[in-house]
Amino acid sequence: MKLLLRSAVLASACALGFTTLPAPAADKVQLTAEVASSVRPPFEQFIKIYEKKHPDATISAKYLGGGPIQADVESDNPIDIVVVGKNQTDKVLAHINKPVAILTNREVLIIPRGSTKVKSLADLAKPGIRVGMANGAGSAVGTLARQMLKKAADDPAFGADFPVKVRGNSPAYFDKLQSEDDVLTGLDKGEADVAIGFVSSVDPSKYQAIPIVDKYNIDSVYYIFIPKAAKNPKEAADMVTLMSNVQGQAILHSHRYLPPPK
């Protein structure tokens, strides 16, 4: 009888112990993002803010050129968040939910600190000047650079052959590059004397900026959107809100971006 009683007590205690064990932690939501490389610095900051606000979620981001991002969205790859320029956004409207404009970027000439080889836009056509630009097929940042050169060519001061001269000064190193990150890497490695890039990329500790006057310049609007193929659209919506609200706009402004068009 005593043995049976002890067994019953032990069984009850074990059962009680099992019922009071903590429940296993739920798996975190894994969001994926594809982001234009020129927006990398602020987006990394936004990821930290988002994950602090949502401890049950993480964001894995790829920073790419506009062409590869467009191809992935058109293929309906399961991406939750996309940040890319207007040229690509306009081409994927059938595959995405409503895009939200979040920033405007502007073309600029970027040179290493202390360099004096290039002083103006006209210098890009001079013999011996090596011009870094994204020449890969479908490159968004390269397309913008070529549009800027074409606008300058409409001015007799530059001449109709200005774009051809500048492209001729771009070393083979840049022939297949897609993103601004890659172009700046080439500049850092000494493969170019100057790069055509965005004002937001001018890190004052490394580079100097040579402004391009407005009549030749190209402003590029960037959007954030959720593709229709996203696996986590509800969770992704909060990143759209974060980047477009007052706090998000202040962060983007601190990274030298201009406001989006109203």
Image (cartoon, helix red, strand yellow):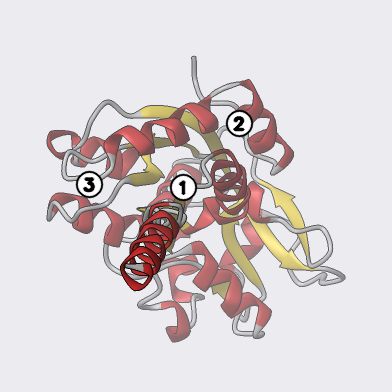
Please state which of residues 181 and 192 is positioned toward the viewer in this rendering.
181
Labels 2, 1: front one: 1
Q: Quadrant of residue 138?
A: bottom left
Q: Residue at x 45, y 42 (%)?
A: 151
Relative horizontal placement of residue 123, taking residue 34 as reference (left or right): right
Q: Amino acid at mark 3?
A: Lys
For label 1, the residue is: 56
Between disc 2 and disc 3, whose residue precedes? 3
Q: Residue at x 55, y 42 (%)?
A: 50
Q: Residues within 10 Å of mark 1 (few under 14, many from 20)?
A: few
Mark carried by residue 231 = 3
Which numbered disc, 3 or 1, marks the residue that appears first in the sequence? Answer: 1
Instruction: Name the kind of residue labelled 1 in the image.
Output: Asp
Name the residue furthest top.
262
The residue that mark 2 highlights is: 248
At numbered mark 1, what does the secondary structure look like: helix, strand or loop?
loop
Q: Secondary structure at mark 2?
A: helix
Residue 136 appears in the picture as rendered: yes
Disc 2 to disc 3, C-alpha distance: 24 Å
Mark 2: give few (<14), some (14-19) or many (20+) Cα within 10 Å. Answer: some
Amino acid under disc 2:
Gly
Whether pointer 2 and pointer 3 mark residues with C-beta atoms closer than 8 Å, the reply is no
Residue 168 image position (x, y, % from top left): 44, 75
* Residue closest to the eye, 246 or 253: 246
